[in-house]
Image (tube, rainbow, N blue to C red):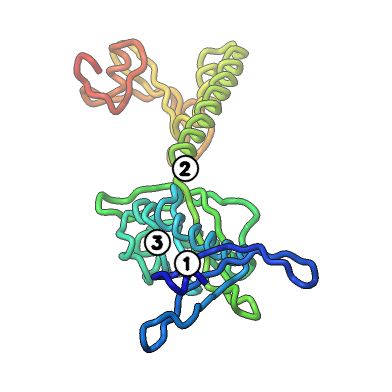
């Protein structure tokens, strides 16, 4: 009743005991009501069960936090697979403004990988969310050019809680950029594979008595993970001659050339000539100066 004499509204929580012995916690909002003469005439009181109110407030607070401060990208997609809401993190990841993508196809910013993304969204609309996050590789169109990214993505089907039957409102797509981790893992796998291949190549070559057979056997193992094509030249006098090669344009073993040793004429500065001068390996992309 004290609200009748004060301005504004007052909020209180009360534990009520029902006649059946049950207890319920309610939240009340009370405000004074004044008559035509401006004098207090009564109190208006609205109340609701606290837990229902807290659940609603938590849901709203969670939505606001995800759409403003989350470290994950969040995109709410409608039933037509067009973004309806994009949070700040997702906008930065996509390279667009938060309002630039609303209602427009994802294909306008995702150059490659959009089919996989839209396929996942359609599956969620039809079947529900997958049991675990999925990693999707996409290529984005940006002002600086194309960027390839890997996103660990989770999906949630959104349905109206007020409808008698579940009515799909769209899909909540949450993603996190894991490109650096995936590239590091791929590089580690590549390095491990190359190390194993070189070990197998060395073992295979050590079992060969003929030097040429040892060289070609070594290349057969060492090529995997390093190159698609290999050539073997020998120094004969002042010239280089081709003695073995893998098939050009297709995979295959390194074999002696069919027509015997072929003399070669390399242009000045060619990596093969620099390797002969150095008596060691050189990088083909390096320059031909003294430090190359």
Element under disc 1: strand
Tell which of 235 and 153 is nearer to you.
Answer: 153
Mark 2 sits on what residue? 178
Give above or below for 74 relative to 223: below
> Which sits earlier in the primary sequence, circle 2 or circle 1?
1
Residue at 62 percent of width and 51 percent of height: 132
User: Would you say 286 lies left or right of 22 here?
Assistant: left
On screen, 69 above or below 106? Answer: above
Name the mark nearer the viewer: 3 or 1. Answer: 1
* 95 displayed left or right of 80: left
Q: Please tell me whether mark 2 sits on a helix, a strand or a loop.
A: loop
Q: What percent of the width, then of the height, locates residue 14?
A: 62, 63
Which of 51 and 126 lies nearest the eye of the viewer?
51
Residue 86, numbered circle:
3
| Cα–Cα span, label 2 and label 1 | 49 Å
The front one of 89 and 63 is: 63
Residue that lies at the very extreme toward the right in this rendered image: 20
Q: Is residue 119 visible?
A: no
Which of the two marks, 2 or 1, is nearer to us in this view? 1
């Amino acid at each position: 009743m004290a609200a009748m004499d004060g301005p504004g509204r007052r909020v209180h929580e009360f534990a009520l005991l029902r006649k059946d012995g049950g207890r319920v916690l309610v939240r009340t909002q009370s405000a004074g009501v004044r008559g035509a003469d401006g004098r207090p005439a009564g109190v208006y009181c609205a109340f609701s069960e606290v837990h229902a109110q807290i659940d609603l407030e938590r849901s709203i607070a969670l939505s606001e936090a995800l759409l403003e401060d989350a470290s994950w990208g969040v995109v709410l997609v409608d039933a037509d697979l067009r973004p309806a809401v994009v949070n700040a993190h997702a906008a930065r990841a996509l390279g667009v403004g938060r309002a630039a993508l609303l209602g427009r196809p994802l294909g306008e910013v995702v150059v490659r990988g959009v089919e996989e993304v839209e396929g996942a969204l359609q599956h969620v609309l039809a079947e529900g969310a997958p049991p675990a996050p999925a990693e999707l590789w996409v290529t984005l169109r940006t002002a600086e050019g194309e960027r390839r990214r890997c996103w660990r993505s989770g999906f949630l089907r959104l349905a109206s809680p007020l409808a008698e039957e579940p009515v799909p409102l769209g899909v909540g797509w949450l993603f996190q950029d894991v490109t650096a981790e995936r590239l590091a893992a791929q590089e580690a796998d590549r390095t491990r594979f190359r190390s194993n291949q070189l070990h197998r190549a060395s073992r295979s070559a050590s079992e060969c008595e003929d030097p040429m057979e040892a060289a070609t056997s070594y290349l057969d193992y060492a090529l995997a993970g390093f190159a698609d094509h290999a050539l073997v030249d020998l120094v004969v006098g002042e010239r280089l001659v081709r003695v073995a090669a893998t098939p050009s344009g297709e995979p295959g073993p390194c074999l002696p050339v069919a027509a015997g040793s072929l003399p070669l004429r390399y242009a000045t500065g060619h990596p093969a000539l620099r390797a002969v001068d150095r008596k060691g390996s050189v990088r083909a992309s390096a320059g031909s100066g003294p430090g190359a």
